[in-house]
């Protein structure tokens, strides 16, 4: 089902003259800023693009629990442990809102899980990097949640109603996540020399993978033009990456840490920071499954799915029994 639905993606942006009457009316609704709701008519490509993006986002939230969950047992204080546990639980909740939003488009959560496990659907590249020290949990909150918010705040205005409403709720929680990450970084950066070094090392390792979260540069982005025309995406990948750099550089300065980019410089003409592009060959290798943790992440998801089989079987048996009873009454 998922594979069938995504066949229709990757079209170029149609001109008005190429659109059918239905497509033109749909585009008029988008241009007027109307929300599209699940039962409204929509082009197949719009539905497929949304399923792909929303489900990949849901998968990212769920897989994103793994690198952080890795530190729940080793958080340095009880308070930090409680905060981290709450954050990891929030990510599970975000995954659930997003799976529900995808389901309104006619695809089931089981189908989406199958697509993740068989490798036909992606999750964010960032979660294929390991969290080696406690400072990495700070860097994940500060940079990874920071990048996620930069991407998700505009998505609150996305054209598909259920997705936009899910985003409003998610963004409130993500802001708290970003602050808790910055707070960890502040403690580490102001701590002992060894702690400061750990914070700098975490920034060094997470900087470029965080920039990659926004997707390939606009010239290599397959979906951006059509997604922006349909207001599924509000900004292009490069626009959001630049905003993220502009926001994060002063924060790093406040922490007394250095961004690991010798080319980084405020451009007086544009008012934005010039910066070095990430190594895109590394990004595409990670997408192909060759990042440091791809195998671990997929093994963990497969194990969770297999271990949960008895719960799903039990629920189905209960539902069948109840249906049979209702039918007999
Ligand atoms: N990782 O045409 P493009 C979070 C794929 S984490 C993996 O530009 P699009 C969180 C892309 O799917 C963030 N794959 O694509 C934080 C496409 O391949 P397919 C999750 C990537 O969709 C803390 C191909 O590259 N957020 O929230 O227009 C804790 C070409 O790219 C990536 C979202 O998902 C990547 N980084 O733009 C827990 C936000 N980048 O599908 C959780 C919603 C690109 O054709 N998503 N690809 O095989 C989006 O805004 C867009 O999907 C993207 C990519 C900007 C990510």
Image (tube, grey):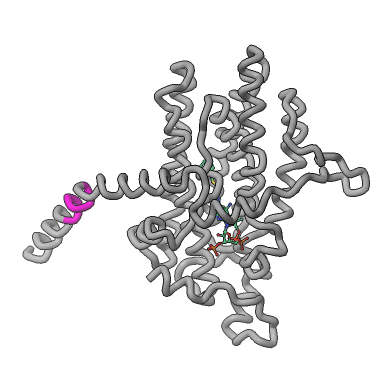
In the image, residue 269 sits, relative to residue 181, either above or below, namely below
Which quadrant is the N terminus positioned in? Answer: bottom left
Q: Quadrant of ligand 1?
A: bottom right
Q: For residue 126, say whether it is visible.
A: yes
Tell whether 123 sits left or right of 155: left
- Say which residue appears at 49% left-offset and 49% top-offset: 60
Where is residue 319? Give x, y as percent. Answer: 17, 56
Tell whether 299 sits left or right of 63: left
Which quadrant is the C terminus positioned in? Answer: bottom left
Where is residue 237? Give x, y as percent. Answer: 68, 56
Residue found farthest to the top: 192
Tell whether 21 sits left or right of 100: right
Q: How many marks?
A: 0
Residue 112, image quadrant: bottom left
Residue 137, image quadrant: top right
- Say which residue appears at 59% left-offset and 56% top-offset: 284
Where is residue 81? Give x, y as percent. Answer: 45, 23
Residue found farthest to the left: 328
In this view, the residue in front, 20 or 293, is 293
In this view, the residue in front, 215 or 328, is 215
Residue 219, image quadrant: bottom right
In this view, the residue in front, 327 or 308, is 308
Q: Which residues are magenta?
A: 311-316
Where is residue 91? Give x, y as percent. Answer: 46, 41
Q: For residue 94, say whether it is visible.
A: no
In the image, residue 20 sits, relative to residue 87, either above or below, namely below
Which SS type dominates the magenta stretch? Answer: helix
Q: Is residue 220 magenta?
A: no
- Say which residue appears at 10% left-offset and 62% top-offset: 324
In the image, residue 78 sits, relative to residue 292, either above or below, namely above
In the image, residue 173 sits, relative to residue 84, either above or below, namely below
- Say which residue appears at 56% left-offset and 39% top-offset: 174
């Amino acid at each position: 089902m998922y594979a069938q639905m995504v066949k229709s993606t990757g079209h170029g942006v149609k001109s008005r003259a190429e659109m059918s009457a239905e497509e033109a009316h749909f585009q008029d609704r988008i241009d007027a800023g109307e929300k599209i709701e699940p039962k409204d008519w929509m082009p197949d490509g719009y539905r497929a693009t949304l399923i792909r993006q929303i489900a990949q986002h849901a998968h990212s939230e769920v897989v994103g629990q793994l690198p952080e969950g890795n530190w729940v047992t080793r958080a340095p204080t009880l308070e930090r442990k409680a905060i981290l546990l709450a954050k990891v639980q929030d990510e599970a909740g975000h995954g659930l809102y997003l799976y529900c939003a995808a389901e309104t488009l006619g695809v089931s959560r089981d189908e989406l899980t199958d697509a993740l496990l068989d490798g036909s659907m992606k999750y964010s590249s960032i979660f294929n990097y390991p969290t080696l020290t406690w400072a990495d949990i700070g860097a994940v909150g500060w940079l990874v949640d920071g990048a996620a918010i930069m991407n998700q705040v505009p998505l609150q205005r996305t054209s598909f109603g259920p997705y936009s409403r899910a985003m409003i709720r998610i963004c409130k929680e993500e802001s708290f996540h970003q602050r808790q990450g910055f707070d960890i970084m502040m403690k580490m950066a102001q701590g002992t020399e060894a702690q400061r070094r750990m914070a700098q090392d975490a920034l060094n390792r997470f900087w470029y993978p965080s920039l990659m979260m926004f997707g390939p540069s606009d010239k290599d982005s397959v979906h951006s033009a059509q997604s922006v025309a349909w207001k599924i995406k509000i900004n292009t990948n490069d626009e959001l990456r630049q905003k993220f750099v502009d926001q994060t550089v002063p924060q790093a300065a406040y922490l007394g840490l250095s961004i690991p980019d010798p080319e980084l410089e405020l451009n007086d003409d544009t008012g934005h920071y010039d910066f070095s592009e990430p190594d895109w060959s590394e990004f595409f290798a990670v997408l192909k499954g060759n990042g440091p943790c791809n195998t671990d992440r997929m093994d963990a998801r497969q194990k969770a799915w297999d271990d949960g089989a008895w719960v799903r079987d039990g629920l189905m048996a209960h539902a069948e029994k109840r249906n049979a009873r209702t039918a007999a009454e």
